[in-house]
Amino acid sequence: MTGPDTPGLAALRPRLPSPVQEVVDERFERRGVRLLLKRDDLIHPELIGNKWRKLAPNLAAAAGRPVVTFGGAWSNHLRATAAAGRLLGIPTVGVVRGDELAGRPLNLSLSRCAADGMRLHFVDRATYRRKASPRDLAGILRAADAEDAYVVPEGGSNAEAVRGCRALGAELRGRAEVVAVACGTGGTLAGLAAGLGTGMRALGVPVLKGGFLSAETEALQRAAFGGRRGTWSLDERFHGGGYARVPAELDAFAADFEQRHGLAVERLYVAKLLFGLVTLAGEGAFPRGTTVAAVVTGRPFP
């Protein structure tokens, strides 16, 4: 278990456990369903939500060594890792998908990474896709002059991260029958499900197309715990066309939710989660008397 008192991480000063907020929304009320928001977006101003939960155990394992990790040009994970490096005084290297970006001005997200001291290394997309191969990973690390660095995978999801996310489930024990979270790489869902109590289930809402996340989540649970843990499932219908795709209907939904409840809704993950839950409630997927907790894993950037 990794927490705010873990040696070397005190400078990060997280707010744990994150607060739980009840939202009164007639789309749930008329179905006899309560909606809670697990405000993981309030854990830390820069290591937001599941980024704290996944990064903290990896930073502890790095034990002050440089950290190298991976992401796209708008990666929340890269920004969080860069911020952690600045706060902890450790070097960070970000391997960025797309060598065509190397000669261009940095976007807002990568500019933030660079301002926080992250050294950016751009690789072509074919090489990036092969980064899970030990041989190709070794080549990437050599080229990035990061052979001695501690490696954190894309999105931060590995066995350490999954064990760190188990605390999210533990914090919600007895609060809801269903706990839902938006999923990119499956690490948060894998840990969340393992931490929930008897009679609770986790629901993952993938934000990418492809139908690969069930196998990935099971593999992460095997790596972290030796096998499948908890009760969990996925609903693949709400990705909105794929990662970073925000169709007009989804954007309008998020703007309406913001107006109703005074919550700034992050579009790439949180909006898809909330849209999925409203749709499921309308379909009668939750029996009357059910309490659903939605994990708010981030907030809009910048």
Image (cartoon, rainbow, N blue to C red):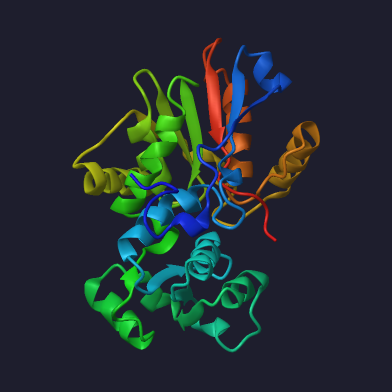
In the image, 138 versus 16, the foreground residue is 16
Question: In the picture shown, does residue 274 fall above or below 100?
Answer: above
Q: Is residue 186 visible?
A: no
Residue at image location 60% in from the left, 26% down from the top = 36
Q: State the residue in front, 131 or 21.
A: 21
On the image, the x and y values in percent for residue 237 come to 52, 39
Q: Residue at x 36, y 51 (%)?
A: 161
Q: Is residue 65 above or below residue 162?
A: below
Q: Position of residue 144 (x, y in %)?
A: 39, 84
Q: Looking at the rendering, in which quadrant would you find the N terminus? A: top left
Quarter location, residue 123: bottom left
Q: In this rendering, does residue 189 appear at all?
A: yes
* Above or below: residue 295 compared with residue 117: above
Give percent across and percent down for residue 151. Answer: 33, 68
Residue at 58%, 77% (x, y): give it.
Answer: 114
x, y (%) of residue 214?
35, 43
Count of numbered tags = 0
Q: Residue furthest right?
A: 259
The C terminus - image quarter: bottom right
Residue closest to the eye, 154 or 47: 47
